[in-house]
Image (tube, grey):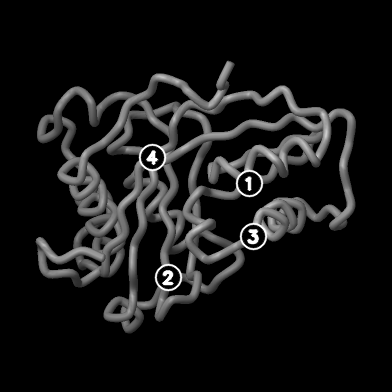
Amino acid sequence: MDTSAVTHQTYNKGELTQLLDIARDAIRGHFSEKAISTSAPKIEHYNRKMLQPAACFVTLEVNGQLQGCIGSTIATKPLILEMHNKAIGSAYEDRRFMPLAEDQLDDLSIEVEVLSPLVIQPFSTEAELFEYLSHSKQGVLLTDRHVQTVVLPSAWRRGLSTLQFIQLLKQKAGWSTNYWSDSMVIKTFTTCALKENFNTIRGKYF
């Protein structure tokens, strides 16, 4: 049985563009004289699909360098509200980086990713995970006791090898490169994603 085949909501380019606009407005609202809350999306402007709870991530880059990445793997809020909150978090609350500055906006890109449901994989060894990822370039969530680490499917676009992808997971968790545990829980997922320049003229994407 292919455990990666899970029925889940998918989002077309128009819907992903709406989510990008929500993220953009959340970031722009921080520099507005009005309260940031005024940039929150209005529920009545979106269809039922966009109001369903969904897990998502927002990734920001400035001149191609990571500037912030905040998200969730569990769906708890309507997607449009979750996207708004994660955009603010990515821009101003990611402790790895200084808060986004207004003079960085011209060089800023935004990527939104909506996660599929997580699939628990029955792998007991790192070799099994390696084999799976070698032919299925998905996102991975590893949990061992109280430590959790996640790498999004978009990381594959950076040209990572399967070994480098797994090492990145371990690095983010603070584990050594040869660490593995019998208590490791492996979950995989896919995303619907779209990336855009902050100041993109509508209709021009990359």
| Of pointers 4 and 2, the one earlier in the residue sequence | 2
Say whether marks 1 and 4 touch (CB < 8 Å): no
Amino acid type of disc 1?
Answer: Ser
Task: Give the residue pinned by disc 2.
Answer: 61
Q: Secondary structure at mark 4?
A: strand
Q: Relative to the observer, which residue lies in front, 9 or 135? A: 135
Residue at (46%, 38%) from the top-left corner? 190
In front: label 1 or label 2: 1
Q: Check the image and name the residue furthest to the top.
A: 1
Q: CA distance from mark 4 to mark 3?
A: 23 Å
Residue at (54%, 42%) from the top-left corner? 138
Q: Position of residue 61 (x, y in %)?
A: 42, 70
In front: label 4 or label 3: 3
| Of pointers 1 and 2, the one earlier in the residue sequence | 2
Q: Check the image and name the residue furthest to the bottom.
A: 103
Q: CA distance from mark 4 to mark 2?
A: 18 Å
Q: Relative to the observer, which residue lies in front, 187 or 61? A: 187
Task: Give the residue pinned by disc 1.
Answer: 134
Residue at (30%, 31%) from the top-left corner? 10
Q: Position of residue 57 (x, y in %)?
A: 44, 47
| Of pointers 2 and 3, the one earlier in the residue sequence | 2
The local crowd at label 2, few if under 14, some if 14 to 19, many if 20 or more residues have their Cα within 10 Å, is: many
Task: Give the residue pinned by disc 3.
Answer: 161
In front: label 1 or label 4: 1
